[in-house]
Image (cartoon, rainbow, N blue to C red):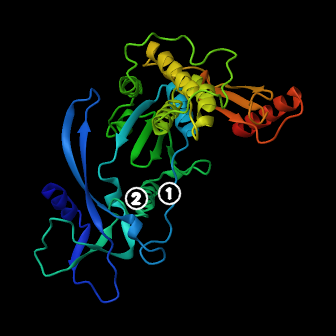
Amino acid sequence: MAKEIRALELNKTWTIVQLLPGKHPIRCKWVYKVKRRADGSIERYKARLAAKGFTQVEGIDYHETFAPVAKLVTVRCLLTVAVAKEWHIHQMDVNNAFLHGDLEEEVYMKLPPGFSASSNGTACRLHKSLYGLRQASRNWFSKFAEALRHYGFIQSGADHSLFIFNRGNIFLGVLVYVDDLIIVGNNASHCESFKGYLDSQRKYVLDILAECGMLASRPSPFPMEQRHHLSMSSSDLLSDPGKYRRLIGRLIYLTITRPELSYSLHTLAQFMQEPRQDHWDAAMRVLRYLKQSPGQGIYLRPTSLELEAFCDSDWASCPLTRRSVTEYFIMLGGCPISWKTKKQSTVSRSSTEAEYRAMATTVSEII
């Protein structure tokens, strides 16, 4: 805690002042976390001071709060192009990213718990975007984007989180996802300062299997039984529906690198409100499928940048609404970049109509 306070003071995050009449300071709290390495061992213990942003008043303590986040399609496209052209790829995490953002509003905060000011001040006048402030993410992105533009980067109009530097024979691309950066470039000297690693979801899968007691389960070759349509069955309601919801939420995150899970999880996610035993058994089938290949993901390889797209529809497949399901899968140079399984918004009166709707959705995604 003392180390965190010293770091905040060195960063000039606040100034201790006397609270003026009519000013209402927001509250703050300490958040404790155990940071672990990729193998699960403890790396260090962290204490972070966070502002209670929910006590901020709109129009006084903050105004705009939105900040762009990189699209996953942009991430995959950028990596695919980089691999195809044999560019350098790096990942970087910005330490204390939010604290770099300058605070425009006049915001006061109560003194941190356990902290005694050296002066006679009664509150902290914030100058930087402390964690927890509603505008913290926006201020950090604005500060970082301004710095990149100063160095000659151009912000993409298709995805505002992508910045391109293209001068002479030097190309450098920076993609921002909150405080994580993906850097690609054709010049090693310009990328050398960006060092890091690309995460795999293997450990994430193993953690889910261990939490559900499925590490010793028999693997399944398919995530869902063929021709098996789940519905609001007559099986027993789960005693703990929250457990089912947490599991499905974690599995949905896996579809970032496991497109083959999209259909199964699209089906299972429809029963979050009242999950039953049949639905839980089907979710366990997905875990058994993951058991056989926990480290599987998207393989990026050097190839020609040819765009391919496939789409299909399952006519009137939903037993509850009889709406059709659209599925598409788009590849760039043989590498998957975008996929989705989605129930169509209206009821199609024929399989042909359902196919045309699926085709229109796919073309819209490509454009």
Where is residue 326 shown, x and y percent of the image?
73, 31
In the rendered view, would you say 299 is above or below 174? above
Check the picture and name the quadrant holding the C terminus: top right
- The reply to whether residue 301 is in sight is no
Q: Is residue 101 left or right of residue 76?
A: left
Per the image, the residue denoted by label 2 is 140
Q: Is residue 163 left or right of residue 158?
A: left
The crowd level at tag 2 (other Cα within 10 Å; few <14, some 14-19, many 20+) is many
Camera-nearest residue between 219 and 58: 219
- The extreme left residue here reads 118
Residue 67 numbered tag: 1
User: Would you identify the image quadrant in which residue 319 lies?
Assistant: top right
Label 2, secondary structure: give it. helix
Gap between marks 1 and 2, in whole Å? 9 Å
Marks 1 & 2, CB-CB < 8 Å contact: yes
Where is residue 252 shown, x and y percent of the image?
53, 33
All told, the count of numbered labels is: 2
> Looking at the image, which residue is at 55% across and 30% down?
81
In the rendered view, would you say 362 is above or below 147? above
> Looking at the image, which residue is at 30% across and 69% down?
27
> Looking at the image, which residue is at 41% across and 56% down?
144
Camera-nearest residue between 98 and 223: 223
Where is residue 359 shown, x and y percent of the image?
79, 32
Check the picture and name the quadrant holding the N terminus: bottom left
Where is residue 28 shown, x and y percent of the image?
29, 65
Camera-nearest residue between 332 and 290: 290
Q: Amino acid at mark 1?
A: Ala
Label 1, secondary structure: give it. loop
Q: Amino acid at mark 2?
A: Trp
The crowd level at tag 1 (other Cα within 10 Å; few <14, some 14-19, many 20+) is some
Q: Is residue 297 left or right of residue 121?
A: right
In the rendered view, would you say 126 is above or below 184? below
